[in-house]
Amino acid sequence: QRIFRVAIDGPAGAGKSSTAKLQVASLLSFTYIDSGAFYRCVALNSLRWHPELFEDGNARHVSLEAPDTRRIIAKVAESTVVKQETERALPGSSAAKGTAPLMPRHRIWLGDDDVSVAIRDNAISRIGSDVAKLIEVREAVGKMQRAAATNVGSRSSGGIVMDGRDIGTHVFPDAELKVFITCPAEVRARRRLLELQKLSGGTGNTESRTTTKLPTYDQVLEGIKQRDVQDTTRAVSPLRKAEDALEVDTSDRTLSQIAHHIADIARQRM
Ligand code: C5P
């Protein structure tokens, strides 16, 4: 069964995150797969199973120099089981009562545990970026990502939308459509903060309300800049535009305009 793959790459929070990619998938009736969620789940499991590897109780960073640490985290990656599902918001359902009516919500499970909110924590973002530098982890996660797309294919959906850093360059170098998203860090920080506010229940969506403390704008911006440096300078699979990727700057377009633009191009190629 041949499926159409839309690979969307770009830096953290450039607009491929949030609703745009979900909307692309929804417009095309494709399945959305969040590739960063796999790294975040490996980070969360590393912290849960091996808290001793982290520098302090708040898990600021993991030192990847020691071969033992690499081996342990590689093992964690191989044992990590992630499930993803997009919840369609039906008119009148609680999920449809947020600010964006009928906007689907993407959920991530680690085993039986719904970690959709937990993996967005700032510490997990940092650790996720750390573990993503390890070739062993990238190989394990690459397998999970390709398997997720294959599963979709066997359920005979028309295609997938996968977003990340190396989907067009590494995971699916032969993707039917590759998009590379760009956007200034300040714009991305504002968007990420809004997204976090929504996730924490700031929009009145009681179902997703949590007690996680929200970071400030400066903290989000700093985090984004740090991760940009990490993601573009790492030795293994650094973030870069694939030669045949279509470049889309998202700064002065709404997420909906971006989504329609990408979906239109996909339709032209199908
Ligand atoms: O996209 P998201 O911010 O959730 O990704 C979390 C981390 O996982 C990123 O900071 C990045 O280092 C890593 N990642 C990656 N390759 C991908 C997706 C994410 O290295 N395809």
Image: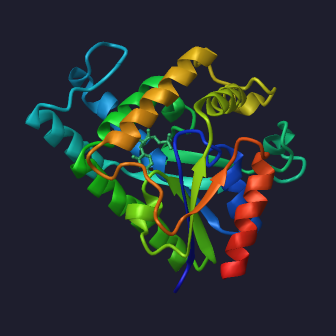
Query: Residue most toward the bottom?
Result: 1
Left or right position of 194 against 129: right
Kindly tell me whether residue 215 is visible in this rendering. Answer: no
Residue at image location 78% in from the left, 31% down from the top: 205
Viewer-proximal residue, 220 or 23? 220
Q: In which quarter of the image is residue 198?
A: top right
Vertical position of residue 138 compared to residue 3: above or below: above
Left or right position of 62 against 87: left
Looking at the rendering, the quadrant in which ligand 1 lies is top left
Vertical position of residue 238 compared to residue 50: above or below: below
Residue at image location 84% in from the left, 46% down from the top: 93
Kindly tell me whether residue 17 is visible in this rendering. Answer: yes
Query: Residue most toward the left?
Result: 67
Left or right position of 257 against 220: right
Q: Position of residue 127 (x, y in %)?
A: 36, 31
- Assign the C terminus to one quadrant of the image: bottom right
Vertical position of residue 185 compared to residue 238: above or below: above
Q: Where is residue 30 in the image (x, y as percent from the top left)?
A: 66, 68
**Scheme of image coloration:** rainbow
Viewer-proximal residue, 44 or 122? 122
Residue at image location 83% in from the left, 54% down from the top: 90
Q: Quadrant of residue 100?
A: top right
Q: Quadrant of residue 245?
A: bottom right
How many callouts does the rendering have? 0
Q: Where is residue 207 in the image (x, y as percent from the top left)?
A: 73, 32
Residue at image location 63% in from the left, 18% down from the top: 217
Q: Where is residue 218 in the image (x, y as percent from the top left)?
A: 58, 15
